[in-house]
Amino acid sequence: MAANDDLFGNAAKAKKAPAEARKPTPPPPGEDGYTAASIEVLEGLEPVRRRPGMYIGGTDETALHHLFAEVLDNSMDEAVAGHATRIEVHFEADGFLSVTDNGRGIPVDPHPKFPKKSALEVIMCTLHAGGKFDSGAYQTSGGLHGVGVSVVNALSERLEVEVARAQTLYRQIFERGHPVGKLETVGRVANRRGTKVRFRPDPQIFKEICKFSPARLFKMARAKAYLFGGVEIRWKCAPELLDPAGKTPPEAVFHFPGGLKDYLAADIEGKAQVAETFFVGRIDKAERHGSLEWAVTWLANDDGFVHSYCNTIPTPDGGTHESGLRLALLRALKDHAERIGQGKRAGAITSEDLMAGCAALISVFIREPEFQGQNKSRLMTVEASRIVENAVRDAFDHWLAASPAQAKNLLDWAIERAEERLRRRAEKDVARKSATRKLRLPGKLADCTNTAADGSELFIVEGDSAGGSAKQARDRASQAVLPLRGKILNVASATRDKMAANQQIGDLVQALGVGTGSHYRAEDLRYDKIIIMTDADVDGAHIASLLITFFYRQMPKLIEQGHLFLAVPPLYKISQGAKTFYARDELHRDEIIKKEFARGKVEISRFKGLGEMMPQQLRDTTMAVGKRTLLKVSIVEEDREETADSVERLMGTKPEARFAFLQERAAFAAEADLVDL
């Protein structure tokens, strides 16, 4: 562009030119192709058909079923408002889905602003038209957007509405959002009232998936019945639409007076709980809003979940009501810990610790809710957090105080989760530091130089003496050695506090790097083989039993994945001249003497422990690959229950069980003594 050109490339001819002359001359209409005709005005429901993702999130299977949710929500609003007691859902063979309620029925009289149209037609064909903007029509409802059923109409190939009001039946039919005709009066009906919406999704919109899933519709309808105990939902589906191998019935009736308590019981059926009973509650008038209901428990061995609802609308992305629940549970539990003198122990508990295994359902009914997006996946009403927190916190305080045994179980469980989280963080810190400087090893661990788990081995040995010999006998590239001081804690009878305070267990867990219990992380295991190597005597067998018990209780997956082994060190050295043999027990010793030493004097020495063996002897007999014998520890699937019973009986908290075991095998012990003699 020339120095004196303006932004449109026009040369400035004279500085004193009139202002009118200096104005740029617009191009003739249509010369650049962008004219008033380019501005398109979408009327009625056309914006919905052009951009369905803006209203229902897309055109996938989830969006398709959102159409059903919008229609069902309207009927549920009638039920919650006290005007309907029954809802019928019918999935027909021709692909039509109908939802019928016995509520008041959509108004059919002429609308004041559109006197030539009925209120029904205005509702079905106009965005942001509905009865939920005025709290006089509904105290609480599934949202204030006013676009729900009109969006369903816009995205349906055909939609039929029947309304029974004042003993008269009315009907109007729509196709792709447009009325086929005017509202017609069908005739008199004596025993019917309410609204029926029957529709079939438009294949022009839902091109990939245009067929409802009966199983998904069934679950959605059942969930609604759980959320409001005063409604009965009747389900019916054409048999030919059902999967023969599925569990969805052709007909069912849902009515759950227990509400969320029944819902939670069905969700966690068969799962072990930390507390025996649920924490449940309901408040019919939460401040100036509607009702609030919750059901909570904690799962002992499974991950938790939180399912939340606002005005019967699922909120899968949570929101302010879930935040209030989390705060209430955490603060009430910590207050309870302070009251019973456990405040210091509970100080580290966070909301994440408490909610890790928490199975919770919460349903709120509030006026004028604010959601994120038209599909209402997240509640944004700020006031909901405070309402839920205040209500649930007081109720949880009473529940904890009234059930001290259950409260103790829950508190111990939460503290264990907090301690495990802190241990994992410490392990991550150690791993992070190792990238810049030498790893600080736990206890007296002598690590191998191989940084990969494949091919690496960890020998757990008894005492410093045996540890010294093992460290000299090992292959430094692939074999690590961790000496333990004396007998490890019996975790089957120890309290959580003792386990947390035990240094040997802490060293062992840190050396392996995988965590314990439900936080076990197989991908973080630092060694391929974990080998328990103890003396070949009674004390050594006892230590090995304690270690196996630890792995069985705290790291069962390590055993199941084939990482745990027992070394088989010799008990005897047998020599004659240049010939030397090693025997693992008395029977093996006698077999070697009989086979290898026919005559002459034989020297037999008994090892008192691994620490007395020379490093070369320990390497050749117990540690060197290709020369050693390893016993793999495994859990036989068909004997799993029997194994659990045996561990509890022999290693658990009841000494009388062990005494009975010894009595049962007294004859075997006496026979063994005679053989030794």
Image (cartoon, helix red, strand yellow):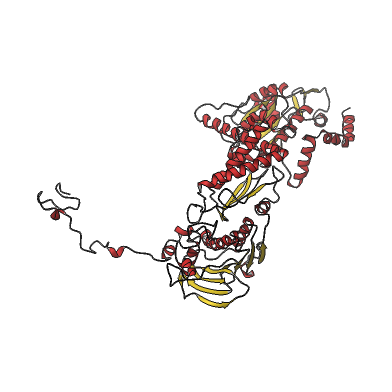
Q: Quadrant of residue 479?
A: top right
Vertical relation: 484 (above or below) 297: above
Res. 556 visible in picture: no
Vertical relation: 443 (above or below) 180: above
Expressed as whole percent of the image width and height from the top left, the position of residue 50 reads: 42, 63
Please give the name of the residue rendered at 74% of the width and 35% of the height, measured from the top-left corner.
492
Please give the name of the residue rendered at 66% of the width and 66% of the height, measured from the top-left corner.
251
Q: Quadrant of residue 418?
A: top right
Res. 254 visible in picture: yes
Expressed as whole percent of the image width and height from the top left, the position of residue 498 reads: 70, 29
Vertical relation: 79 (above or below) 657: below
Expressed as whole percent of the image width and height from the top left, the position of residue 426 reads: 57, 31
Expressed as whole percent of the image width and height from the top left, the position of residue 435 reads: 51, 31
Q: Quadrant of residue 631?
A: top right
Please give the name of the residue rendered at 80% of the width and 35% of the height, measured from the top-left corner.
654
**Quadrant where the image shows the C terminus:** top right
Q: Nearer the viewer, residue 620 or 576?
A: 620
